[in-house]
Amino acid sequence: MAEARYVLGIDQSTQGTKAILFDGQAAMVGRADLPHRQLVSPEGYVSHDPEEIYRNTVQVVKDLLERLRIPAGGVKAIGISNQRETTVAWNRSTGKPICDAIVWQCARAEGVCREFTQAERDYIRSATGIPLSPYFPAAKMKWILENVPEADALADSGNLCFGTVDSYLLFTMTHGKVFRTDYSNASRTQLFNLHTLTWDETICRRFGVPVACLPEVCFSDSCFGETTLEGVFPHPIPVHAMLGDSHAALFGHGCHHKGQVKTTYGTGSSIMMHTGDTFGSSTHGLMTSLAWGRNGTVSYVLEGNLNYTGAVITWLKDDLNLISSAGETEALALAANPRDTTYLVPAFSGLGAPYWDADAQAMLCGMNRGTGKNEIVKAALDAIAYQITDILEAMQSDSGAPIQRLCVDGGPTKNRYLMQMQSDIASVTVAVPEAEELSAMGAVFMAGIACGLYTEDIFGRLRYAQYEPAMPRQIRAAKYDGWKAAVGMVVKK
């Protein structure tokens, strides 16, 4: 048997599934990817086929090991990171999904949320750390119970399983032997009490979700179970970490202590601040979640989410036809008139944290006769930095602690103009890692440490390029005041 000296990361994201292999020195040696279909109904419902996702999971692992010619017996442990809040329902006896998975961004359960009183909403927010919303699994589960014919009967018989993608993958890859999730994913369901660290029976009853339908909640570095992944491995391999993708990125950056912050720049953005081992609620429009459970204790985070960060660049390309690729934006922004006062408020689907105005509409303002393509592209990039700064300001207000360093990841971090602007406007050091795939890396690092292959010193090996604030204070204040004024034109609340 080959020496087990590799850790496999499975990163199951909204757009596709990646398998990433790390060696005994915690260096990435290869990856394989497969996209899955985005199923959009005439009503605008967004779904994924869970069985397609599982088939892709098996295939990317098989493809990666074969391409690298790594003996399957050389893998010591598996770590899983997953798209959060996407909700799967399946038959416990057969393992078959009873409907397509409802994707996190799907708002079909909006009507469910309208049924709740203000007192119920307040209790949900205080217990779970997040405001009532159709984006979280609780409302999606109630929608399934009300709209999928076999769901109710399966729930009554104890044969219905509700879970996020991690628990579905684990159940399927262990052939129904293991039904578990971790603290990070549980904390995003809107059914998990962050004070008692248990499923909240009062909230579950209100959503009509039997606790028996929900997975066992475990520490994120647990040995969750073993799998051969449909024969890809010659003997069972332990799954030694499961984390929601944003939480995994926080861990991958080494942000393990109170006050440390990371931002993931994707289609949208997740900004997280580690807040220690006690629950703290936000009074500035943020959410509280669990970072993870590890070494017998749990850690909490404050989090703000944005709908439009990388999606702003997609808008420039696909809708305005101002650019043909994201890579063009850096040069165009640098060529723009630095004195131009154009602002873009990208409220294309309302504004999220910290404003929470679903009715806000997007706006370009402050243009003059000299405003052209370069200036509009610059305004779009600036809007990303401004939005993230809004959340960082809210985090500092909630925590009472100044943020000095911001770890970042995601495709837009390659844009040097954006990273310098982020540093200038937020007045923080912005640290961009040389390594990519921070979500998968976080799950791999946690699994590797848990199985004894890695030690904590792996985080000291991460290399970062750093951007330091260079904008004069008066200019920074004027620019940020202009942004606040622009937001004030679209926020009605």
Image (tube, rainbow, N blue to C red):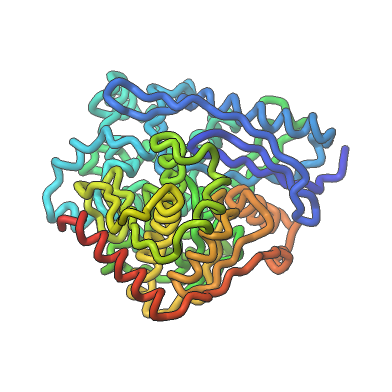
Question: In the picture, residue 195 is in which quadrant?
Answer: bottom left
**Above/below status of 361 relative to 236:** below
**Above/below status of 165 relative to 350:** above
Q: Residue furthest front?
A: 369
Q: Quadrant of the C terminus?
A: bottom left
Q: Position of residue 304 (x, y in %)?
A: 37, 58
Question: In the picture, residue 232 is in which quadrant?
Answer: top right
Residue 302 in view: no
Could you say which is closer to the camera, residue 42 or residue 292?
Answer: 42
Residue visible at 60% across and 54% down in the picture: 414
> On the picture, is 36 further left or further right than 29?
left
Q: Position of residue 445 (x, y in %)?
A: 66, 55
**Above/below status of 320 relative to 388:** above
Residue visible at 74% across and 49% down in the picture: 28
Residue visible at 22% across and 38% down in the picture: 110
Could you say which is closer to the camera, residue 167 or residue 43?
Answer: 43
Q: Quadrant of the N terminus?
A: top right
Residue visible at 66% across and 65% down in the picture: 464
> On the picture, is 123 further left or further right than 35?
left
Q: Position of residue 81 (x, y in %)?
A: 56, 45
